[in-house]
Amino acid sequence: MSRGDRSHRVNPSKRGPDAWSEVNWGAQLADFKQMQYHQSILWLALVELLVEKGIITREELRDFVRELDRKVAIMAIPGGGVEKKSTGASPVPSEKRGMKKE
């Protein structure tokens, strides 16, 4: 890059307080990513323990997640969540949740 190409760049020291707000924003983003990573690890460990103990199968969990995703998608549609009310029924069989069948 030649010297002439650099003339359009802004010196960070001349940018004032906005430069610090950008640094702060970047630090907050890094903190958020780290927090999200740790939460993902926690959820993975929890699921592995539930599967290992036979409380739930991977297939039941997958079906449950798909059902929740479908419900959230319906609620995201304007008017979609108003008419259709959830029965509260869980796609996970009651005996797997520690409840007795009636």
Image (cartoon, rainbow, N blue to C red):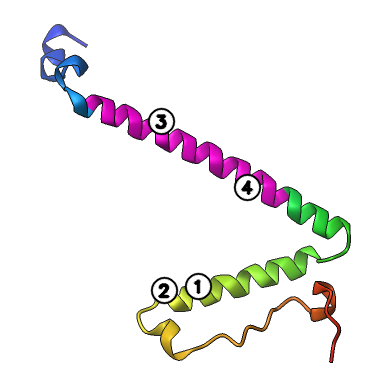
Question: Residue 40 in magenta?
Answer: yes
**Residue indicated by mark 1:** 72
Name the N-terminal-most of marks 2 and 4: 4
Point out which mark residue 27 bears: 3
Residue closest to the far right: 53
**Residue indicated by mark 4:** 40
Name the N-terminal-most of marks 1 and 3: 3
**1 and 2 marks in contact (CB < 8 Å):** yes
Q: CA distance from mark 4 to mark 3?
A: 20 Å
**4 and 3 marks in contact (CB < 8 Å):** no
Question: Can you give x and y, in whole percent of width and height, for residue 101 in the image?
Answer: 85, 87
Q: Nearer the viewer, mark 1 or mark 3?
A: 3
Q: CA distance from mark 1 to mark 4?
A: 20 Å
Give the amino acid at mark 2.
Ala
> Which SS class for mark 1?
helix
Q: CA distance from mark 3 to mark 2?
A: 31 Å
Between 81 and 24, the one nearer to me in the picture = 24
**Residue indicated by mark 2:** 76
Say whether residue 90 is left or right of residue 74: right
Give the amino acid at mark 4.
Ser
- For the record, the magenta segment spans 19-44
Q: Nearer the viewer, mark 4 or mark 3?
A: 3
Q: CA distance from mark 1 to mark 2?
A: 6 Å
